Amino acid sequence: MKSIIKNIAFCGLALVGAGFGLSSCEDYLTVTPTDKIVEEDFWKDKNDLNNAVNGCYKSLVSNEMLGKYVYWGEERSDNFERSTSTAATGQVANIMNANLLPTYWQFNWTPVYYSINLCNKVLAHAPEVIENDESFSENDWKPIKAEMLTLRAFCHFLLLRTYGEIPYVTKDYNNDSEDLRLPQSTQLCVLDSIISDLESVKNDAMEDYGNRVLNKGRITKKALYALLADVYLWRASYKAGNNQPFTKIKLASFYQGEMTERQLANRHEEYSTTAESDYQKCVEYCNLIIDMRTKEYIKELNESGKNVGGGEVKVELEDLLEENMSLTSNKSAYTSLFTTGNSDESIFELQVDGDTYANSMITGIFMGLDKKAGEFTGAASAWESAESNPNISTSSYIFTRTDMRRFEDVVWTADQGSFLIGKYVNRQVSQSNTPSQYVTDNTKFTEANNNHPVYVVRTASTLDCNWIVYRMSEIYLMKAEAMSQLYSDSENLKTAFNYVREVFKRSNPYAYAPSNTVATDSLKFEGNFESQTEMEKLVLAERRREFVAEGKRWFDLVRFALRRGNTSEMVEILSRKYATNKKAIQSKLADMQSLYSPVYNNEIKNNNLLYQNGVWNVNESSSKTDNL
């Protein structure tokens, strides 16, 4: 154990000092990093602090972390299935079939807690830098503190959505006298703590670093607001379904702690605010972001000289989204968002330089550089055809026939008989000169057909695609989702609808072209989305269309179930992808707790204060699914 401990300590300091990669260190919550002498020599001036801050960001783009975003947010969703090159009885296949074992390496949360510890190191040692470096003041520290608390909150929020109940870590650990052995906190406790942290520094975050890359790649006030809106939306949904207590306490035989009366009492959750007030906070923060982006847009127009005369500018919702190809324009939102990166629409994206950090994770899970399948392919039921009417909420197909995203996100290959995931992997998607010829085509799409796009796949030297965390389209959809829960009147629901329509319209230009006479191609509010339930389903469908392969779909489905306090509707949606074993899948996911992953078995063994998610047997060689 001592050698592992020292390796983690040196690994952490190397990352802080030079931005090197994350080592393969397991059981983070049960280890005691050491090398205090190096720690004491490090925090001398603001350069040390800046290097440490850089190390926090770098840790979030290691391949281990990038993998977590995809595996945890997509693997169990209805978007994908295992590829033919992935073992039919292996870990990926089992997880996709709701067969989860606590021994699976994918449930190792070490990389995420590693990033949390780096943030906590900065938070703990910044006072030393203020004392040692006269050029670094308390005011200089405030925006950096906001960054660190936001990155830490981002990591905890990822863990919470994956596991439900997690240790909430606010202290750094780096010497032999400190054992990091913490119990899980309830989901509400973690959500409350995240919100409290972010609210405490929301006015201190930077608005403008004076550089586009920094404005998109570091935490800004807009990024902090976006995370707050996201967390409020989750907490509102948790409260709406009255999801307490989350986990049945089922202790492992080697559990050595004692579940005291105080701990049991802490599991009783008292809501200090209502679901409605949290939904309203989500809307408020989305509005703040929209207002800030609107002012930026007007400033950009004035500075570029496009606003001739400097008169008042009327900004439409579509102006804050990247323009996509229209019948008269070849501009591509896909290129701006996923190839060039750091687009005007972007709020926060993790920077991948393709050198020190190459996004090779995507080619392992998605489409390979040889245009062969990775671990995942598009689920046949979702991609084999397209819906002709976007106003139908029960279709298993992701896209309608006019949606350009269905060409941009996957590549159909007849030789492999599958839909390869092109999102992020494709560096370029060239559109047809006559888009009406292919956007109305309801058949499989191939490169052999001249009416369809041509794809240029990234190379080993161009695996530099950033990982987008938040962009304006998500702000629109978060606001619409919250409004669908707050209001039942036609006026407010129509406002929510308008935000969804703008995201849909951007990728469906032909549906809104004057030459298009097909009445069902575009979204229609009247007669379709005039109820809260239908508006909620529209938002869920549009989020699926907009964020394919971006690590969001599974969490969207879980939030949908949380709001109802049961899994029945969510499982009905999910089970559309299964040609067989539907009843078995429905049985496995009948319990709300089954929507969350089991704690990695090694963590349970080494930390005697942790307990396993109640639906998963604590025996390392069995799972809930063994008896089904």
Image (tube, rainbow, N blue to C red):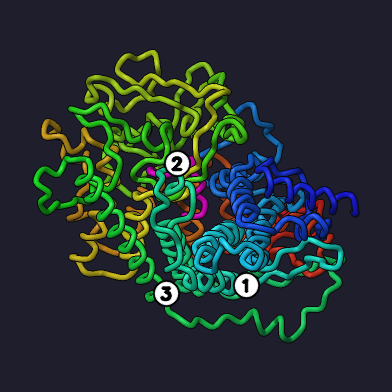
Q: Amino acid at mark 1?
A: Thr
| Element under disc 3 | helix
Give the mark nearer the N terminus: 1 vs 2: 1
Label 1 to label 3: alpha-carbon separation: 17 Å
Q: Which residues are magenta?
A: 545-556
Say which residue label 2 marks: 548
Residue where numbered disc 3 is placed? 275
Q: Are marks 1 and 3 in contact (CB under 8 Å)?
A: no
Numbered disc 2: secondary structure: loop
Q: Are marks 2 and 3 in contact (CB under 8 Å)?
A: no
Q: Earlier in the sequence, mark 1 or mark 3?
A: 1
- CB atoms at circles 1 and 2 under 8 Å apart? no
Within 10 Å of disc 3 (Cα), the crowding (few <14, some 14-19, many 20+) is many
User: How many other residues sit within 10 Å of disc 2, few (<14), some (14-19) or many (≥20)?
Assistant: many
Please tell me whether residue 141 is drawn above or below residue 244 in the rendered image: above
Q: Position of residue 84 (x, y in %)?
A: 61, 27
Which one is nearer the viewer's eye here, 156 or 120?
120
In the figure, is residue 542 to the left or right of 512?
right
Q: Is residue 510 magenta?
A: no
Q: CA distance from mark 1 to mark 2?
A: 30 Å
Q: Which residue is mark 1?
A: 186
The amino acid at mark 3 is Ala
